[in-house]
Image: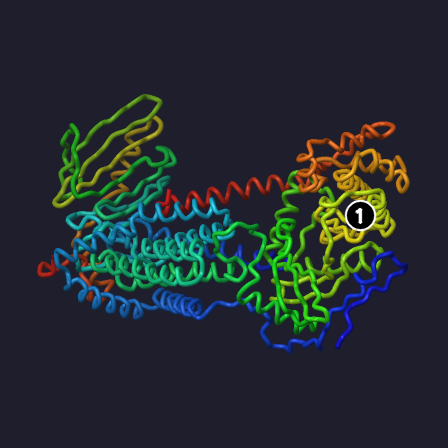
Amino acid sequence: MVEPIRRQRSRAIEEPAGARERRVSRSDRRRRPSGEAPPLPRSLNTTGRYWLAATGLVLVVWAAALTSGRTNNYILAFDQTVLRWVVDLRTPVLTTIAQGLHALGSQWTIRVLFWSTVLVLLVVRRFRHLFIFLGAALIVIAASTFMTYVFLRPRPFGTEILGDWTMFADPSRPVAVFAAILVGMLYALVPQGRVRQIGKLVAACLVAALAAARVYLAVDWPSDALVAVVFGVTVPLVAFHLLTPYEVFPVAYRRGRSAHLDVGGRRGEAIHRALEDQLGITVLEIKPFGLSGSAGSTPLRVCAKSDPNTYLFAKLYSGHHLRADRWYKLGRTLLYGRLEDEKPFNNVRRLVQQEHYALHLLYYGADVRSPAPVGLVTITPEREYLVVTEFIEDAKEISEVEVDDALIDDGLRIVRELWEAGLAHRDIKPANLLVRDGKVHLIDVFFAEVQPTPWRQAVDLANMMLVLACRSSVERVYERARRQFSVEEISEAFAATRGITMPSQLRRLMRAQGRDMHAEFLRLLPQPPGRISIQRWSLRRIGLLAAVLLASLLIVLLAVFNFRWAGLL
Amino acid sequence: MTRWPLLTVLVPLLGGCAGASSSVFEEARSPSCEYQGQPATPMIVLAAQAVPSATLLPCVKLLPAGWSVSDVFIRSGRARFTLDSDRAGPHAVTVVLTRYCDLPPVTKVPTDEPGTRRFEQIGDVRPGVGFTGTRFYLFQGGCVTYQFQFQGEERAGPIGDTNLAVSFVTRDEVRSRVREDTGGRADLDPSPTRGSR
């Protein structure tokens, strides 16, 4: 049995003993030996490997065909043999059927399938799947077109061509694009399971029918159709498997924030195993918890086996959250300049290290009443981690309790302690202030910053006063604040705080109450403070704005050019 | 950060590959009458497949200075390429091969291409603005249209250049090329015994 991490406080904080003395039973931790797979390895499944191998084979054959006339002759001999056999099957009825099936690869069919998929993905706001669908389609279009210009292979010789075609034959672009769009639709729109399996069968039949019809009509050589199928299936298949693995980005038609990962299935098992191996905790249950208050991670409540059983709080971070954080910071930089440190994290490991460090700093270093850190858990190295902390049981969000003088003092004391420790929380809002037994607990320290600017510290004070005033009164909070902060400090806080510097949950709460508490606080001050501008203009910001505009324009032009080329527009 | 070094290597590499291969690409993609000492390029073979009845196929024989091929597009039933000129402007001449032509009111003129009948239609001549006109070559199994759209006042020079630049190869020449390229394994056209059903 390993004892849980215990807090070594420099001074006692008055809190109920029962809350702090709870223990989580821990067994021995197990170090993962070198070479052993992580709890949730990221890999292609068997089908994906086969398609990738087939694509590799195609590339080898292509390379051989480009460099060796003999290979070309073998391919031609194969194609002619198959084509002669197929053409010998021609009958008026079969020709009519083949010409009907040939329409599957027409521009209009492709357009309808493509744009309806884009529309559905926009409506259900599955943007990641949308971008991968667009990207895979673009790659297949561009690469298949490029390859036709590399090989310059004419249409089948010696046979009457009975269908429409455009430009060179190898690979068959309509077959490749049709296959890519069908596979993309399956992985972007159809939930994994039986329906997708049926969908795969249907898609396989449709693609095979189109390829066969084009060979029958002598529009494509057999090898061109075959290569197009391999290429058209592999690109979206591999892209979706690697960039939107089912465990991370399941296709589901239920409400919920896209930031939240599915914690069932393989990932659920991996989390169980990882917690047991890396923290020595026997997990009884893992459930999503407080999803509505979190957008930057997937919060979980973990029931750990103990006597009695104990709850832990865990936040699951993935590359998805890292990218969301990058976009958030880029957006803030574009809109406001550098409000604070908007430097994005390099990888998920750095991101969780920041949170883990902040937890230790607040709990052990600053004496702020915050959740005790329990540990960091690797789910997939460099991709997914779990930050585990104490779960503050039986606590309520501050917006749900009556705020009296003692609670106001306690909340304001937290800000004072942060100031004295040289820290800023940077996200003080009702969802991050929990009340238990008349004490305020500060949670979600992800944004916490060491040695922040005075401006940032001032914003923390104003936000805390606004939160407290939501459930009491402005006058009361101001009066209590005067006991811990000077008029100058309060004035600075409200001069620095407005608009974007207030968390959106706090702004919504104030709007719901129909009050402009910021203005009410300003009226209480002896003299109105001057405004501190939150707009920061710099060469970097101007350059970034120009780069973003240029990149957006280039992407749109590239997409339009390719889509027009492929007849999708 | 680790991606930048990779990009800095990849981008010049890709750029270099594109640059090195562009001349080869252009040559092979051009609808030239000759390619590597043989009649017809793959583009002309494809044009022959686009209009299987055509006994003659338009091609670029010799590009005078200041002229370039800008746009080649071939689909079943139609083959097209465009010539740009630094004096007559972009898309100065568009050459289109089809099975049939709808002839507007035209004037028959003596042909300069054996095996064809030539017709001319003067569209519009506006001093200081430009010249538009159409030339038709009719032959067994096909029709080739030259659409002239010259910018500027000069007319005789660009037309003379076009006469030099665009010529024809016979289907038999293309057929021979295909047989040669495939080692005698394939014929351009179906044999009389293997038609459609």
From the viewer's perspective, tell me whether residue A465 is left or right of residue B189. right
SS under mark 1: loop
- Residue A10 in picture, x, y percent from top left: 89, 60
On the image, numbered disc 1 is attached to which residue? A452
Indicate the chain on which mark 1 is placed: A
Determine whether A145 is above or below A52 in the image.
Answer: above
Question: Few, some or many C-alpha atoms within 10 Å of disc 1 (few <14, some 14-19, many ≥20)?
Answer: some
Seen from this angle, which residue lies furthest top?
A: B127
Let me know if residue B85 appears in the view: yes
Residue B195 or residue B172, whichever sits in front: B195
Q: In which quarter of the image is residue B65?
A: top left
Determine whether A279 is above or below B92 in the image.
Answer: below
Residue ID at (16%, 27%): B105
Image quarter of the C terminus of chain B: bottom left
Seen from this angle, which residue lies furthest left?
A: B193
Q: In which quarter of the image is residue A349?
A: bottom right
From the viewer's perspective, tell me whether residue A382 is left or right of residue B27. right
